Image (cartoon, grey):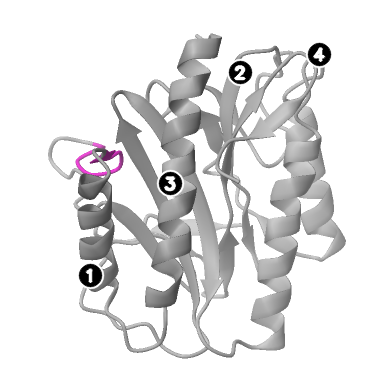
Amino acid sequence: MIRLKNEKQIAGIRTSCKLLSTMYKELLPLVKPGVETLEIDRWVRAWIKKVGGKPAFLGVGPKKNPYPAAICISINEEVIHGIPSKRKIAAGDLVSLDCGIDLDGFISDQAITVEAGKVSDAAHALNVATRECLYKGIAAAKAGDRLLQIARAVQGHAVEHNYGVVQEFCGHGVGLALHEDPQVPNYPHGPNPRMSGGLVIAIEPMINQGTSDVEILEDGWTVVTSDGRLSSHWEHTIAIFSDHTEILTE
């Protein structure tokens, strides 16, 4: 069931989203060659605690294997859900960061992909195109239009650049829980409800340099490209109003 948010709820979600985007700005200098991804996770936990929030990702998932960190850090061929570890970021890596904050029950969700040091021209081109896919999708998110307009915009831009669009994972409703209805795919597939004022969703293109196919590693979380080529991931939480659309995590 799709839960449309009222003005008070959107205000709470907006505050959470602004904190998250501020956190990313302060985190960026730490995302560089030689830094352990576990160090980034520790920094994120401390920052969220300092502002009075809780990590929205920590402990989600199956009881037998809950997600063990506050932020997902996925490098190069890792698409999403990479688990922070003693691994050090290397020069030329594409480092995807995905995080959410629970602030008094209001949830934010945002992902960015950082270029660590000097990356290859091909890696930079993929990253730029993926971010463009995100904004193409946001431009298509308008009250009165159908949800799959977002998917068509994302897929269309990726295909123009001969990139693969991940199909097994998608965006989602968000705000009062981390994952709500509706699902927001990046290719035209599934239910196609009309978007209405009060809809809060996370749009998150996951675009691959090669095949769209992905696999899940033995840790039960980390999703990688099946061909081992690069992937990029960008995400914003947005709110749709009757007369405009607002990027809450901008």
**Amino acid marked by disc 3:** Leu
**Amino acid marked by disc 1:** Leu
| Sequence-first disc among 2 and 3 | 3
Element on which disc 1 rests: helix
| Local crowd size for mark 3, using a 10 Å CA cut-off: few (<14), some (14–19), many (≥20) | many
Q: Residue at x 63, y 36 (%)?
A: 185
| Local crowd size for mark 2, using a 10 Å CA cut-off: few (<14), some (14–19), many (≥20) | many
Disc 2 versus disc 3: nearer the observer: 3
Element on which disc 4 rests: loop
- Determine the CA span between mark 2 and mark 4: 11 Å
Q: Which residues are magenta?
A: 54-61
> Image quarter for residue 106?
top left
- On screen, residue 176 versus residue 220, left or right, reads right
Question: Where is mark 1, residue-wise?
Answer: 38
Rendered location of residue 47, percent (x, y): 27, 54
Q: Residue at x 82, y 19 (%)?
A: 145
- Determine the CA span between mark 2 and mark 3: 20 Å
Question: Where is mark 3, residue-wise?
Answer: 20
Question: Where is mark 2, residue-wise?
Answer: 199
- Determine the CA span between mark 2 and mark 1: 35 Å
Relative height, residue 61 to residue 225 (above, below): above
249 or 189, which lies in front?
249
240 or 76, which lies in front?
240
- On screen, residue 113 versus residue 28, left or right, reads right
| Local crowd size for mark 4, using a 10 Å CA cut-off: few (<14), some (14–19), many (≥20) | some
Rendered location of residue 189, percent (x, y): 69, 31
Instruction: Check residue 247 for magenta coloring.
Output: no
220 or 109, which lies in front?
109
Question: Where is mark 4, residue-wise?
Answer: 144
